[in-house]
Amino acid sequence: MKNYISIFAIALVLFSCNSEEKRITKITSPNEKVLVDFNVNSEGRPFYMVKFNNETIVDTSYLGFEFKNIPAFNKNFIIKNSNISTFNETWQMPWGEQSEVVNNYTELKIELQETTSPERFLHIIFKVYDDGIGFRYEFPEQARLKNDVFITEENTEFNLTEDYKTFWIPGDWDIYEHLYNTTSLSAIDALQFKNHKNLAQTYIPENAVNTPVTMVGKDGIHLSFHEAALVDYSGMTLKVDTENLNLISNLVGSENRDYKVKKTMPFNTPWRTIQISDNAPDLIASKLIVNLNEPNKLGDVSWFKPMKYTGVWWEMHLGKSSWDYGMTQDMNTWTDGGKSHGKHGATTENVKNFIDFSAKNNIGGVLVEGWNTGWEHWIGFEDREGVFDFVTPYPDYDIAEVVRYGKEKGVDIIMHHETSAATETYEKQQDTAYALMQKYGMHAVKSGYVGKILPKGEYHHGQYMVNQYNNAAIKAAKYQVAVNAHEPIKATGLRRTYPNIISREGLRGQEFNAWASDGGNPPEHLPIVAFTRMLSGPIDYTPGIFNIKFNEYKQDNQVNTTLAQQLALYVVIYSPVQMAADLVEHYEANPEPLQFIRDVGVNWNKSLILNGEVGDYVTIARQERETENWFVGGITDENSRTIDLDFSFLDSDTTYEAILYKDGEKAHWDDNPLDLKIEKIELNKESKLSIKLAEGGGFALSLKTK
């Protein structure tokens, strides 16, 4: 569909002032519910305030920078110029939660100048939407600030006016794989998680939180703090002043340098974002993060097809098979002297079994982990550079035959690149690895970065790794490869600019249920994730575990949901690639719930958040692009509840044949997780339905036109 764009300046104010004058510049969102008020104080310190529905939600919050070897940007500024404009467009998602996205905002550009030597310039841009704000710093070209700038800290404040109920994970510089905590803002204590037995690496230097961090106020105001367009910059955590209810940016650093960000003039920072709503569902509906990113730079990406996939993955976490083939004589190359231990998962025969199953069940891809040499040597080795290559298969995996067989059956093979966080090895081999994929017509890769970053002293979320992740995806696009990154940097909406960035992990995933010693992910985990991590972008959570207890493999572990909730996750937790993660034999033993996985879409025309409360429950309806069929999913935490639905979103004069998969009368996430009831009903626009969700339960609903 054609884009509709209208851009016009509604006000242009040019003025200059001396250091004693105060110039207040205010702008509001298109619906006038969100207001931003910017100024400089008597010391020339720039600050902003935010109001929502005439209530101050962010009070006087200062802005500035500290640098290496040059004076800080923190005071002695005047407002030199001001420019206010509006923008309204509708753009198309090549894939996503919806076909079209409205991008409508009011923009305020503030030009600051120092009143004291060296009289440098700084611009601050605010974009104010109906669903929140984004602002960033622009360092314009200027004679008094040249060449490279070394940022030691960015001092962006969010001074809050209430002790909000807060859903947070620690400001870890290395991983996001923490359970969410629910406390008041004043009770946040991230340092208690400095040593975590279930995590491969972790570094928490401050009482800080990672973003998105979501808050709920006593009067129903919902806030979520994050960032957008993270490019060539360090990831931002938020240090918490529990006494004054203040958040302040704390950039991820490095042990290898005495600054956190190196930039070449002129440059922009990422956007600092606040999503604002008076209800929880509108947080999920917000498209603020993607809207703050630049438009598509890749053009036509129709070579990437959103899909469901199966794969050689869950069986390794259960211990049924392994990633490695056996011992080799040489840690860098495969030799014929290596002997298999008989548990290797990525065999030609096993992968063909997954291909056959996928072809029968409307599943478009198969992920193969453990196919390439090196797995025997990467765990526990300090120097992991050179351990993996990304073109050499083990002797029992015939990559050409597997691809041929998949094409015959109409099933794509998804490549796997576990880098073991050995970045120099991966960077050197990327062209060769992507070229191999291009040769075989593979268009998607799951990358992994397990372990401490090499070179030593770097962290997963610092500028060095931000560039590694982004550059890997940009290079992949040249080979028509889409990237699903695990152990990633945070999602910040770059999927708009580079639509081959399709999904990522960035949270405690399903695998923690299989091997974590702390009981796995509790029932409240995903009802929190939907309103926190999912606000940043698609999640490869790997749903669809039917064998909830898996006692034949691990007596002390299980999935902490009902079977009905596992089905609901295909609708609730969004990704354009959705895994049917369980073993083939477990699906074949349960053909009735498998039908929902066969039917459910992955690429949506519309998404509607029907209800929800952060950390408690959520219900989402999505309409598939290709068929226009609707699918609805709802999940709850450890509390049972009844969800009332009306179907006014359906087309008029249309009757839908619906299949409802819901918790049985005795269902319970721990006591009786497999109790599932399936009903066939007819629904239309006038229909209403009440569905009881068990503790840790959910429901899934498919609606097809008659």
Image: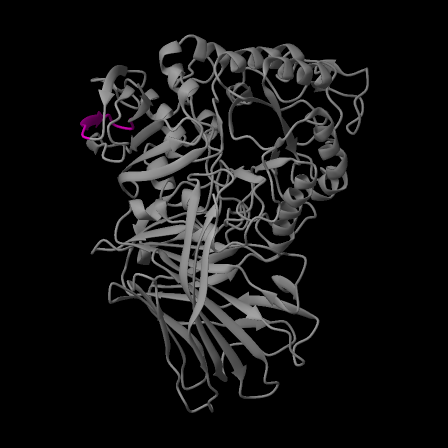
Residue 77, image x, y percentages? 50, 83
To which quarter of the image does residue 340 belong?
top right
Residue 658: x and y in percent read 28, 20
| Number of marks | 0
Classify residue 140 as left or right of residue 646: right
**Residue 505 visible (yes or no):** yes
Location of residue 172 with respect to 381 vertically, above or below: below
Q: Residue at x 32, y 16 (%)?
A: 674
Q: Position of residue 215 (x, y in %)?
A: 32, 53
What x and y, as percent, mark residue 525? 36, 36
Q: What residue appears at the point 68 percent right and 26 percent down from the top-left corner?
A: 441
Q: Nearer the viewer, residue 86 or 132?
A: 86
Determine if the magenta segment contains residue 692: yes
Q: Name the quarter where the C terminus is drawn.
A: top left
Q: Name above or below for residue 692 compared with residue 452.
A: above
Horizontal side of residue 30 vs 688, given as left or right: right
Up the image or down, 161 lies above or below 537; here it is below
- The part of the image, by quadrant, that contains residue 33 is bottom left
Looking at the rendering, the stretch of residues picked out in magenta corresponds to 686-697
Any magenta on residue 665?
no
On the picture, is 116 further left or further right than 520? right
Vertical placement of residue 196 versus 517, above or below = below
Residue 60 appears in view: no
Task: Name the residue: 44% across, 9% down.
Answer: 588
Q: Quadrant of residue 636?
A: top left
